[in-house]
Image: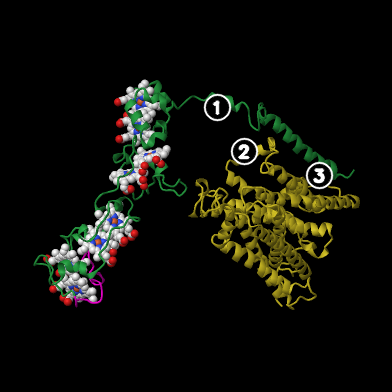
Amino acid sequence: MPQQVPRLAAVFAVAVIGLFVARSLLVPDTFGDLGHYRAAAIDTIVAHPKEYAGHQECTMCHRPIAEQRAASNHRGVRCEVCHGPAAAHVANPLEIKPAVPRERDLCVLCHAYSPSRPTGFPQIDSVTHNPRMPCAGCHEPHAPEPPVTPRECSACHGQIANQLAVSHHAELNCGTCHEAPKEHRDNPRAVRPTKPAERSFCGTCHAADARSSERIPRIDLRSHGQPYVCWQCHYPHYPEAR
Amino acid sequence: MQGYIYPNEFELQWSLLIVLYPYLTGLVAGAFILASLERVFNVKEVQPTYRLSLLTALAFLLVAPLPLLAHLGHPERSYEIFLTPNTNSAMAMFGFVYAWYLAVVLLLEVWFDYRKDMVLWARESRGVRRWIYYVLTLGATDISEKSLRFDDSAGRWITVIGIPSAFLLHGYVGFIFGSIKANPWWSSVLMPVVFLFSAMVSGIALVLVLYMLTTMFRWRKIDMACLDKLAQFLFYALVVDFSLEALDFIHRLYESEESIEILRQLIESRLFISLIVLQVVMGTVIPLIALALVSPGLKKGGFLRTPPELRQIIYLVAAVFIQIGIFSIRWNVVIGGQLFSKSLRGLTVYKVELLGIEGLAMTIGLLLLPFVILWVLVKLLPPWSDGPEPDTPPASG
């Protein structure tokens, strides 16, 4: 037999025997009894101390909060999701207190904007959404409400309102020139207010024969700026003539 | 992000490292198959690359599992897949496929091929080197005629086993992707075969580049017959590879399953550069045309007569383009398969991180590591048979 064969055979034998020895030493006894895992792992897990109490436990002593939460948008978010495991607190409520998470990080875990969240889930961009203030300052964590849409036009059209306020038209309301249905505030893109469409509209105050305050400058509606509409030359929210 | 995706598809789970893994194993299989050409099919021209191919395959094989370890984390637990083999999982069988290929095929073949030299080197050298070589021979120092003949025939038999094993190693990687039936971009029986041929292409191209560079830096003359033969094989492998890919593609188009629309969007938007530009045009069409025109293996003297120096440059550029193309193939398979939603209604994006365990830096590191290992291997087991290096570069001209 060539010299190579026994030498190689020895190396391979060592490797294979090594594998079997390692198997017998390292593979846990109960491995494979129930499946491709260590069956005794179940007992190990059962033996872990209980850290969570379950939200039903809290109701007994924190009834108002529990009822508030159960009826709120956070009804699906259990107490210990935010306050952390509290079994020890239930056993010894005065000595051991659960965490009270006042930092913004907690809420952002669920509410930070992420394209992978389901459509319609309330999300915010933490960087721009009222930074440097705790969320709980504005939203009650146990009963958060969906935001109410602001009523005033200026809340959404801030720039226009600001300009108008310092313009010659400062004394005019939005409603003078626009008819905004109530639904526009809730669904602004679908329901649109009216906009003036004709020269004659501005003429109601500015035409030479208009029945308006004397102080209002007049023009000859038939010749002035023809054939264009007025807002091609005068921005209506900040009209300038001089 | 565009369209609708499921929440768990936003982030890609298989990162750049998983692109690297099939790329590396492909190089291993390809380099080995090249080596076996000389051994089993007696292609004498490529003999100068025989040992280099073996060492290349070995160096890359040693690195091949590292991307997986880095990706999975907990490398200290990796031995467990050997201890508790799970025969139901193709992925869990990786350890055995790998160990078989490393220990039974590559190491044995290298050992039989180098044994005589190692015995001689052990006799020539002193000190530590002597011991290293002696240990490497495992004490089998008999270099009689009969014993060497045994080495030779054992080596040949191992190569015979090795070819299907190399097919197994890389076919296996393709199998992993091809068997994921929930993913229309991957699920295809052609996958292992396509992987295999692209492996051959990349392996041959790599050895071609390494052969040219190592020869040049040792101030030797490049053996043009060898290079031409390599280029010819490269051409054939590329033709088969491209045909298979095209077959797969046309088959998908003709079948026109419901996924076809999203795959069209995928190719037109996310994969346009890496698939159309890099993989098809740069990595396949340009090298195919270049090789077809200049290779003297296809038509005596080549369709275009070229001086050897020009041909070398063309080969080198074609081989580098092919490497880029093959890497793009891996990218397109691995990353492409995760860019579209299983809802078939949306596409996500993949941003490569720079640092971090799965980042670009790691990938580059792992790509360079095989070359470092190869350098060590070459120092230890010089693959050249053309005598000692000349002290001074030969006079030009």
The crowd level at tag 2 (other Cα within 10 Å; few <14, some 14-19, many 20+) is: few
Residues tagged 2 and 3 counted as in contact (Cβ below 8 A): no
Say if labels 2 and 3 share a chain.
yes
Point out the stretch of residues depicted in magenta: A222-242
Label 2 or label 1, whichever lies nearer to me, is 1
The N terminus of chain A, quarter of image: top right
Helix, strand or loop status at disc 1? helix
Q: Is residue B180 above or below residue B31?
A: above
Residue toward you, A238 or B392: A238
Q: What residue is disc 3 on?
A: B139
Q: Position of residue B336 (x, y in %)?
A: 58, 55
Residue toward you, B173 or B251: B251
**In the image, what residue occupies the spot 70% across and 29% down?**
A24
The C terminus of chain A, quarter of image: bottom left
Helix, strand or loop status at disc 2? helix
Q: Is residue A49 left or right of residue B154?
A: left
Callout 2: chain: B
Q: Which chain is yellow?
A: B
Amino acid at pointer 2 = Arg
Q: What residue is disc 2 on?
A: B77
Callout 1: chain: A
Residue toward you, B295 or B142: B295
Cα separation, mark 3 vs mark 1, equals 52 Å
Quadrant of the image occupied by residue B89: top right
Cα separation, mark 2 vs mark 3, equals 34 Å
* Magenta run includes residue A5: no
Q: Position of residue B131 (x, y in %)?
A: 75, 47
Residue B1 visible in the snapshot? no
Amino acid at pointer 3 = Gly
Q: Which chain is green?
A: A
